[in-house]
Amino acid sequence: MRPRLPRDGVGRDLAAAFAELDLSVDYPDGTGAHHVLDWQAATFHLDTAREAGALTWAEQVREAVAMMLTRDDEGELRAELLRSAALLLGWLYCLDRRASMARPIRLPRASSRLRRQARSR
């Protein structure tokens, strides 16, 4: 079953990326306690960045994904997958917002009558 996604820029791009996934294969999760050291390192980097006032999307996503990978319980894994997906989606929206703010503002062109009036002054 494929999800219905919003048709804004991110939703459209996400739908295209999702369509490329092969969902007929059910891979093993590969999660569990063997990822705890990765999660501890990611948490250390996140806390250090937060204390330094230099928190980034990358640090937050790294910690969320590392925590997700430690989960064996399917309910906990699902909750962490949703948290990670929400963070990634938030990051995508921020990238798009930054890009839209960086575009020059196009003002409507003045009518020929207004341009003539301005030249005659």
Image (cartoon, rainbow, N blue to C red):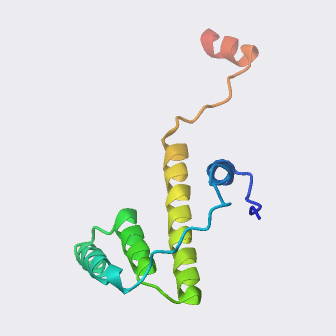
- Based on the displayed image, in which of its 4 quarters is residue 57 positioned? bottom left
The quarter in which the C terminus is drawn is top right
- Image height check: is 43 above or below 109? below
Q: Position of residue 110 (x, y in %)?
A: 69, 22
Q: Residue at x 63, y 16 (%)?
A: 118
Q: Nearer the viewer, residue 81 or 115?
A: 81
Q: Position of residue 28 (x, y in %)?
A: 53, 73
- The answer to whether 1 appears left or right of 20 in the picture is right
Q: Position of residue 62 (x, y in %)?
A: 37, 69
- The answer to whether 33 appears left or right of 112 in the picture is left
- The answer to whether 21 appears left or right of 6 in the picture is left
Q: Nearer the viewer, residue 3 or 47?
A: 3
Q: Position of residue 51 (x, y in %)?
A: 24, 78
In this orientation, does residue 121 appear? Answer: no
Q: Residue at x 75, y 61 (%)?
A: 2
- Image height check: is 72 above or below 91? below
Q: Residue at x 46, y 85 (%)?
A: 71
In this orientation, does residue 40 appear? Answer: yes
